[in-house]
Image: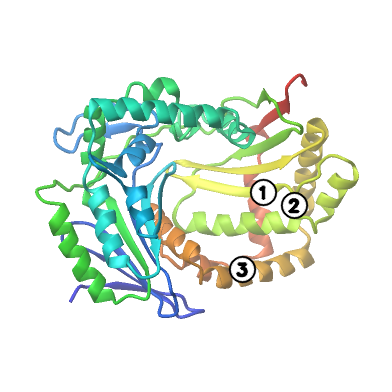
Amino acid sequence: MSRFEVEINNITQDKVYKTVLKSGLKLFICPRKDYTKKMGMFGTVFGSIDNELVDIETKERYKVPDGIAHFLEHKLFEQENANALDVFSKMGVDSNAYTSFDQTVYYFETADRYEECLDKLIDFVSSPYFTDQNVEKEKGIIAQEIKMYEDEPNSVVYYNLLRSMYKNHPINIDIAGTVETINKIDKDILYKCYNSYYNLKNMFLIIIGDVSVEDIVDKTEKLIQKYYTNRKADIVERNIIEEPEEIKQNEITSNLPISMPIECIGFKMKPISGKDSVKTMIISDIINDVCFSTSSEFYEELYNDGILISEPEFSFESGRNFSHIVISSFVLDTSKFESKIKSYIKKLKEQGINEERFKIMLKKRQGEVIYNSEKLTWIYRSIIESVIQNINVYDEVELVNDITKEDVDNFIKNNLDFDKMCISRVLPKGSQ
């Protein structure tokens, strides 16, 4: 019998079983007897910010082209005579993959064929097939994707904000890279990145649904023995990211053929990780509800003054050696919006948030966490976050009950620093 750590949701009593197999693979199992669907996720702690490679064989360190993690994601669902998305689709199974700043994940969702799906998933991810021809073909496909995002206002305003905020950190590069950087990718560098970052000590497998824990362990170990033979596994050596505290520039403006301006205001923070990151995420959600939602006085003021028509969003993002706040919205008057945001934050720093609204929104957030913790998406995201941040799966469920108004007020005072504020705007073509 495998040795498990068991994490328990103290509200719902749901459990997540986690273990590390002999191969080094981290395995997470969340049995849910009332679920009709089963989900499998096979991932690696390798994303767009991993732009340096320490070769698993030679230990040589060198720069790799931006966008290579995303490029690998595209190629690993394709074998010599098969495409994973087509195979799963013919089985009647939902399947896809994604790459973020710090992870790449491949997944399926099925009602009744999870054993077959698990076999297919591990087979595809474990069987890289790169040739000069198919790599060149993929460059054209991804180049079109990159060009599409260059015309997408939400993407442009967000990545411009990161570029103005960060000087050295690779988060300031689009996850897909650029047309120039992906053209530097060849099959040799793809195999080197695959062998180093897709080794089992850097990977995780998540199974959620009406399954037997021991049965999953047995099946997984057999599949790993079947598909991962003579593969070296070792702890990945990460790139060293040295990022100064100050921002790169105060503002950046782009023009696109859009009807209404879109704006992001960001505040660069000192990096936060672990449980502190979870707590900060909860605090930012409460600030969003108390101060920026459609039920807030500030939103009503902005709306009545004709400054915006959509609800602003206040959000916190963090990862390996980066943390920041983003306030984003479609706006009618960018200069008035910026002025109002600055004045409002000054007021919050001086007076704190409204206590009555804090109590209401804290209860709302507590209820949402309990409700969301039953959902597939919340479970797998929390499990992945536990891998990336080295935290417990249900930390959010525990920490949401400990948040105080003082926590929120101190966060605003200490982190919304105007010296570290960046503004990114995308304006209609022809406007200034």
Task: Measuring from the top left, give residue 421's x and y in whole percent.
Answer: 65, 34
- Residue labelled with disc 1: 314
If you read the primary sequence from the N terminus, does the residue marked by circle 2 or circle 1 appear first?
A: 2
Note whether residue 54 is visible: no
Q: Which mark is residue 292?
A: 2
Note whether residue 174 is visible: yes
**Quadrant hosting residue 355:** bottom right
Report, in whole angstroms, how far the alpha carbon at label 2 lies from the one at label 1: 7 Å
Q: Mark 1 against mark 3, which lies toward the viewer?
A: 3
Which residue is found at the position 75% from the left and 49% from the top? 311
Which residue is found at the position 52% from the left and 26% from the top? 147
Residue type beneath disc 2: Phe
**Quadrant hosting residue 334:** top right
- Neighbour tally class for label 1: few under 14, some 14-19, many 20 plus, Cα within 10 Å: many
Q: Secondary structure at mark 3?
A: helix
Residue 138 or 325: which is nearer the viewer? 138
Colouring convention used in this rendered image of the protein: rainbow
As drawn, the residue found furthest toward the front would be 90
Q: Which mark is residue 368?
A: 3
Asked if the residue at tag 1 contacts the one at tag 2, i.e. Cβ–Cβ closer than 8 Å, the answer is: yes
- Neighbour tally class for label 3: few under 14, some 14-19, many 20 plus, Cα within 10 Å: few
